Image (cartoon, helix red, strand yellow):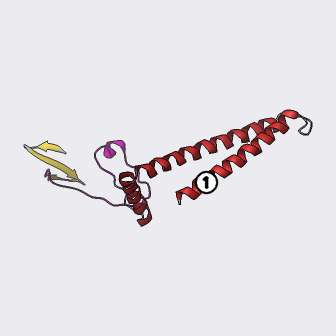
Amino acid sequence: IFKESGMLSINIGDSTVEYNESFRFYITTKLPRPHYKPETSVKVTLVNFGITQTGLQDQLLQKVVQFEEREIEERKNKFVQQGAINKARLKQCEDDILNLLSSGTNLLEDEEVINTLDNSKRIADEIAVKQAEIESSQK
C-alpha cells in the first residue's frame, strides 16, 4: 500500500488500483501448511479451517467444564501432569538399564544390574497401575 497522487494505492499484478480501508482480501489454499515470505506473513492473518467436528466438540466441552466444573478441570490437569511424570520415570529406568547393559559386565553376576532391573520392574508396575487409574477416572 502506498500513497500516489494523495490517494492510497496498491499494486495488483502489473496494475495500480485505488485502495479502500474497508477492503478485505481472502485467499484459500489446499496446502496443509502454507509457507509465506516473512514480509507477507506480518501483513496477513492466517486462519486454519482444517478443524473437525470432533475437535470443536472437545474444545467446547473443555470450555464448559472449565467454566462449570473447575474441580474436574483441575483434576484433569493433574492427571496430565502425572502422566508426563510417569513417562519421564519410565524413560529414566530405560536409560539406566541400557547404560548397565552397555557396560560390558557379566549381567548375571552383577548385583547392581539385578537390583536396577528389579527396581525398574517395580516402578513400571506402579506406573501401569497409576495410568490405569488415570484412564478410568477420565472416562
Which quadrant of the figure has residue 60? bottom left
Query: Residue, x 45% and y 52% (percent of image)?
Result: 72
Horizontal arrangement in the rendering, residue 135 relative to residue 107 (left or right)? left
In the rendered image, residue 131, in percent from the top left (x then y), is placed at 62, 52
Residue 59 in view here: yes
Point out the image quarter for the N terminus: top left
Residue 6 image position (x, y, % from top left): 7, 43
Residue most toward the bottom? 53
State yes or no: residue 114 in magenta.
no
Name the residue rendered at 63%, 55% in the picture: 132
What residue type is disc 1 on?
A: Glu
Majority secondary structure in the magenta region:
loop
Q: Residue drawn 37% across and 57% down? A: 64
Q: Position of residue 73 (x, y in %)?
A: 44, 50
- Range drawn in magenta: 20-46
> Which one is nearer the viewer's eye here, 59 or 124?
124
Horizontally, residue 126 falls left or right of residue 97, namely left
Please give the residue where the numbered disc 1 appears in the rendered image: 133
